[in-house]
Image (cartoon, rainbow, N blue to C red):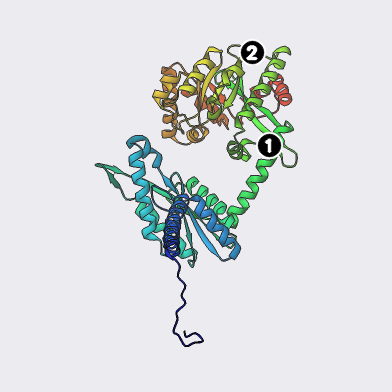
Amino acid sequence: FQDIGGTPKMIGAEWDVTSDVLLNETLIRERQLSESKNAELKVAKAHVEHVALHDPLTGLPNRRYLDELLAEKSVTGTRTALLHLDLDRFKQINDTLGHAAGDAMLVHASKVIKVNTGPGDFVARIGGDEFVVVSHGRDDKQLSALGDRIITQMRQPVDFQGNPCRFGVSIGIAAGTDAKQLLVNADLALYRAKGSGRNRHEFFDEELQSEIVRTKQIADEILGGLERAEFTTYYQPQFDARTLEIVGVEALSRWKHPERGILAPQSYLKVAEELNVVAIIDRAVLEQALESFDQWSNSGLKIPHVSVNVSAKRLEDKDLIDGLRKLAIRKGTVSFELVESIFLDENDDLVTWNLEHIKELGIDIEIDDFGTGHASIVSLLKLQPRRLKIDRQLITPVTQSIPQRQLVSSIIEIGKSLGIEVIAEGVETNDHARILKELGCDILQGYVFGRPMDAKAFTAFAQSRKWLAVG
């Protein structure tokens, strides 16, 4: 600029901007680093979330992912279908070929399910050998077809290191708008599919719902009945086939239902097994039978022995022998009937140990329902029971069928050759009694001589000796 005298002049200012430039560059680098770290965190977070929501073996969504999905579906209230799949005979593959083979089968199963489902379907492995498919837009016919396709393909053998592996799948199917309830309903349908023979699918429907309600009601009533001591013991006499003298009684469980009267085991045993209370009922019957036996002895009524049904579950009780010792059972007065299909061909150390000690306590062993279960000659030789009881299904036809009579005769001969007494149950007529006596049967039990009755009625019956007139 020019001053007053017109002389040109210059005024300037300068400063060092190096630090500002360096700071700016630093900020840019830190921002880039932060963005990079955020990107890495997002990737890491996504990985963690994926791991948390997916099965590491099959790569499918897991139970947690399924729960979150069903929670979302419940909010929307849209109709959803759910298939609950459970592999059949998978445990045998694990047990025989090892977990590597089992893992390979799970991966194969997941691929079969994925191949048969659509892109809009949600497939998850929810634990062990269980899978779930959540589907939309399929009606019951299409869901049934989907289930059939999966079942058919799952049956095909799968090679593992030269070993052909065969397994199947059972499927429960449920549909509705309450997504949270779907898994429960599909699980119930799956339970029915397994109970109906496996390798099949079943739908949850109103009939199954009603059955569940009935079962729950019976279960509640059973538990209440146990608390109120409503379970009692009835006695059916057993007779010498030659003399018709009473040689024993079978103690039978009965339920004094407050509304439905006296109920036989077929009315409640299945539900009691599911509740795991059969052993409690068994013990109540045994204690009541011992009490009745003492009363009969004290009154001069000579009943040689009482037979009590024992469930397989009770034979697996590690505290069974200690409990029996406390009852101070007199030797030879009590027999335990094995009421379920004989499983003694398989090695079960605890059951074998219990049976040996039961015998040491002076309690006899009887095999019930012989001829219809899985009892074998090997079982008889191993168990060495005191008696075996021929099932009524084999006894009923002997009055009309010669081949059936020959079959019963063969069983009696097997018993005699092994030193085992043979009881025939279901003796309904005098012809039954006559034929079985001729065949060499030792003991008869059936309605022709006496029905099951309570302790008081049995005492009066035994004292009356009325059955001799019938015989």
Q: Residue at x 52, y 47 (%)?
A: 191
Residue 64 is left or right of residue 215, and the answer is left
Identify which residue, 234 or 427, lies in the foreground: 234
Q: Position of residue 406 (x, y in %)?
A: 41, 30
The type of residue carrying mark 1 is: Leu
Q: CA distance from mark 1 to mark 2?
A: 28 Å
* Residue 346 marker: none
Is residue 24 shown to the viewer in this render? yes
Outermost residue toward the left in this view: 162
Using a 10 Å C-alpha cutoff, classify the residue at mark 2 as few (fewer than 14 neighbours), some (14 to 19) or many (20 or more): few
Identify which residue, 322 or 467, lies in the foreground: 322
Q: Nearer the viewer, mark 1 or mark 2?
A: 1
Query: Which residue matches tag 2?
Result: 328
Residue 268 is left or right of residue 115, and the answer is right
Query: Which residue matches tag 1?
Result: 223
Residue 456 higher or lower than 220, as above or below? above
Secondary structure beneath disc 2? loop
Is residue 245 shown to the viewer in this render? no
- Rendered-image quadrant of the C terminus: top right
Residue 269 higher or lower than 308, as above or below? below
Residue 94 higher or lower than 300, as above or below? below
